[in-house]
Image (spheres, rainbow, N blue to C red):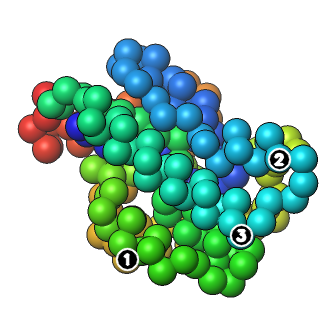
C-alpha cells in the first residue's frame, strides 16, 4: 500500500484536496476521523478523546493495509503528526506510545498544505491565529521523523494541479508507476 497523507494547519484545504485527489485517482480516502469524533461530542474534548482519536487513526491504517492490494494508493486526510502536535499544544504533553506509532505507521509521502488560503471558521477549528506556527511545527515533526514531504501551495485549480504534479513526480521517482 502506498500511504499518502494530506497534512497542514486548520483551514489549509486538506479535506478539499483529499477529495480532489481521491476522485482524480479513483482511489480510497480515509476520512478525517478527528473532525468527525469532535463534532459528535456534546462537550469539550479531553486528553482521553485525543488519545482515542490517535488510536483510531492507527487502527484505520491497519485495516486499510490489510485490505489493500500491492501498489494501492490510500490517501489520508491528516494523521498522527497533527495529533502529536495537538497533544503538545493543548495539553503540553503527549502519550509515550505515540512516538512509536508515528515510526510504525510512517506514511510514504505527506503533502503539507501551506496556510495560504483564507481562514474559514466552522465550530470545530480553534487556531486561526496560529496557522503559520502550527505549519512550522508540522514541518519540524516531519523532518524529525524523516518523513518524505512536499509543500502544496496555490489557490483553487492551481493548488490541485500542484498536488497532482507532486504525487505523479514522486510516484515516478519511487518507481511505483
- Which disc number belongs to residue 93? none
**Camera-nearest residue between 174 and 97:** 97
Relative image position of residue 37 (x, y in whole percent): 71, 44
Check the image and report above or below for 23 versus 44: above
Q: Name the residue rendered at 30%, 62% in the picture.
A: 104
Separation of marks 2 and 1 at Cα, in angstroms: 33 Å
**Camera-nearest residue between 163 and 7:** 7
Relative image position of residue 151 (x, y in whole percent): 45, 52
Q: Secondary structure at mark 2?
A: loop
Q: Secondary structure at mark 3?
A: helix
- Looking at the rendered image, the disc whose residue lies closer to the viewer, 1 or 3, is 3
Judging by the rendered image, the residue that carries numbered circle 2 is 41
Check the image and report above or below for 30 versus 157: below
Quarter containing the C terminus: top left
Q: Name the residue rendered at 28%, 39% in the picture.
A: 65
- Which disc number belongs to residue 144? 1
Q: Secondary structure at mark 1?
A: helix
Q: Residues within 10 Å of mark 3 (few under 14, many from 20)?
A: some
Relative image position of residue 130 (x, y in whole percent): 75, 67
Q: Name the residue rendered at 44%, 42% in the picture.
A: 60
Separation of marks 1 and 3 at Cα, in angstroms: 24 Å
**Camera-nearest residue between 107 and 50:** 50
Mark positioned earlier in the residue sequence (2 or 1): 2
Residue 144 in the figure: left or right of residue 169: right
Check the image and report above or below for 139 versus 8: below
Separation of marks 2 and 3 at Cα, in angstroms: 13 Å
Residue 147 in the figure: left or right of residue 49: left
Judging by the rendered image, the residue that carries numbered circle 3 is 47
Evaluate whether residue 153 shows in this view.
yes
Residue 85 in the figure: left or right of residue 63: right
Relative image position of residue 75 (x, y in whole percent): 41, 36
Amino acid at each position: 500500500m502506498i500511504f499518502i497523507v494530506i497534512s497542514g494547519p486548520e483551514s489549509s484545504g486538506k479535506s478539499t484536496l483529499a477529495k480532489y485527489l481521491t476522485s482524480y485517482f479513483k482511489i480510497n480516502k480515509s476520512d478525517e476521523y478527528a473532525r468527525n469524533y469532535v463534532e459528535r461530542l456534546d462537550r469539550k474534548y479531553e486528553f482521553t478523546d485525543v488519545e482515542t482519536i490517535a488510536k483510531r487513526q492507527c487502527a484505520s491504517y491497519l485495516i486499510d493495509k490489510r485490505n489493500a492490494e500491492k501498489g494501492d494508493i490510500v490517501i489520508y486526510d491528516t494523521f498522527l503528526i497533527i495529533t502529536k502536535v495537538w497533544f503538545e499544544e493543548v495539553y503540553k504533553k503527549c502519550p509515550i506510545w505515540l512516538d512509536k506509532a508515528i515510526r510504525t505507521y510512517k506514511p510514504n509521502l505527506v503533502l503539507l498544505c501551506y496556510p495560504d488560503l483564507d481562514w474559514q471558521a466552522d465550530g470545530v477549528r480553534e487556531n486561526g491565529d496560529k496557522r503559520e506556527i502550527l505549519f512550522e511545527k508540522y514541518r519540524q515533526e516531519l523532518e524529525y521523523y524523516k518523513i518524505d514531504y512536499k509543500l502544496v501551495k496555490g489557490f483553487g485549480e492551481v493548488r490541485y494541479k500542484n498536488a497532482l504534479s507532486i504525487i505523479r513526480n514522486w510516484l515516478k521517482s519511487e518507481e511505483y508507476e
